[in-house]
Image (cartoon, rainbow, N blue to C red):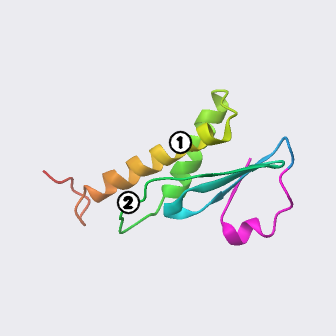
């Protein structure tokens, strides 16, 4: 499994049937490729001031699903998007000093 952005993807060869290449696309989702099978897994964009860590959190969610035996590309993307969304939503609920609101 390889995670990459658009410019990194252009440097990689085509994905083999046993390899999954995931091109992250920020707020629009991620493109999953395995052999000839390709799928854009969309996400619901949210407004954030600092997306730091969202990509790594997305990767962690995808890897978690993979080690639990998931193989469907669309289903693999959902836990990644969910984890990244939770991270970003939590960050938005903090003020600039890092203290939670309310």
Residue 11: x, y in percent? 81, 69
Residue 97: x, y in percent? 23, 64
- Would you place residue 43 above or below residue 50 in this image? above
SS of the residue under disc 2 = loop
Report the residue at 46% width, 63% height from top: 52
Residue 28: x, y in percent? 52, 61
- The stretch drawn in magenta includes residue 2: yes
| Residue assigned mark 1 | 78
- Left/right of residue 20 with respect to residue 55 in the rendered view: right
Q: Give the range drawn in magenta.
A: 1-15
Report the residue at 39% width, 67% height from top: 50
- The stretch drawn in magenta includes residue 97: no
Query: Where residue 70 is drawn, which disc sits there?
Result: none
- Left/right of residue 82 with respect to residue 68 in the rendered view: left
- Left/right of residue 75 with respect to residue 45 in the rendered view: right
Q: Foreground: 65 or 28?
A: 28
Q: Foreground: 90 or 35?
A: 35
Residue at the limit of the structure toward the top, as seen here = 69
């Amino acid at each position: 499994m390889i995670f990459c952005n658009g410019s990194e993807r252009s440097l990689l060869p085509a994905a083999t049937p046993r390899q999954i290449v995931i091109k992250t696309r920020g707020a629009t989702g991620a493109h999953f490729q395995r052999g000839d099978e390709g799928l854009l897994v969309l996400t619901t964009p949210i407004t954030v001031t600092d997306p730091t860590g969202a990509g790594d959190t997305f990767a962690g969610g995808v890897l978690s699903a993979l080690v639990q035996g998931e193989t469907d590309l669309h289903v693999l993307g959902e836990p990644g998007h969910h984890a990244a969304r939770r991270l970003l939503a939590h960050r938005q609920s903090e003020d600039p000093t890092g203290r939670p609101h309310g």
